[in-house]
Amino acid sequence: MIHMQGLDIAIVGNKDQTSLMRMAGISKYRHIVEGEDLPENIRKSVNEFLDDAAIGIILIPEDWTHYISDIIEKVRKDKRISTVIVEIPPDFSAERLDVKAYYKAYTKKLIGFNVEI
């Protein structure tokens, strides 16, 4: 059994997203520059983080998740994997003003029920 305490959080994102999360204390990150090899770089970074047993949560912008939909499905189905992939809003637009509602709905989608804290 994997000891869950002390697992790290990592982010795969653009310069703004990774910089913001680094200011929040996340030290493991992959800065991805958008270009023709974007899907390959995202997949490679996510797989590297999944191979790191010290990482418990991987953050990725929701507009990039279609590049790794097969990986996300594998992680969700495999009960032995302790890493969770969390989709984050891709930007800070006005449509994301109700962050609590967004993550409440996301949590329900991820685990099947609501969690109130």
Image (cartoon, helix red, strand yellow):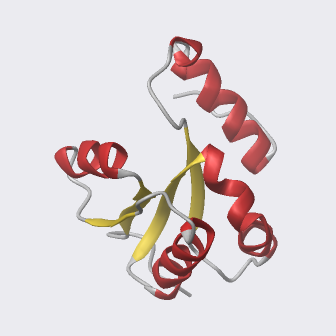
Quadrant in which the N terminus appears:
bottom right
Residue 26 position, x and y percent, is: 26, 57
Residue beneath the point at 55% across and 21% down: 100
Q: How many labels does the image show?
A: 0
**Side (left or right) of 47 relative to 19:** right
Q: Is residue 65 left or right of residue 11?
A: right
Q: Measured along the vertical axis of the image, is residue 58 above or below residue 1?
A: above
x and y, in percent, of residue 39 in the image: 62, 68
**Picture layout, residue 1 above or below residue 18:** below
Q: Residue at x 55, y 66 (%)?
A: 38
Q: Within the image, what quadrant is residue 71 found in? A: bottom right
Position of 116 with respect to 70 (left or right) is left
Up the image or down, 64 lies above or below 58; here it is above
Question: Residue 46: horizontal and vertical position, in percent?
Answer: 53, 73
When asked about the image quadrant of residue 106, the answer is: top right
Which of 45/75 is in front?
Answer: 45
Percent position of residue 112, x then y:
81, 44
Looking at the image, residue 83 lies above or below residue 93:
below
Front-most of residues 64 and 112: 64
Q: In this view, does 30 lie to the left or right of 81?
A: left
Q: Which of 11 and 79 is in front in this view?
A: 11
Q: Residue at image x 60%, y 75%?
A: 43
Residue at 67% over, 55% down: 65
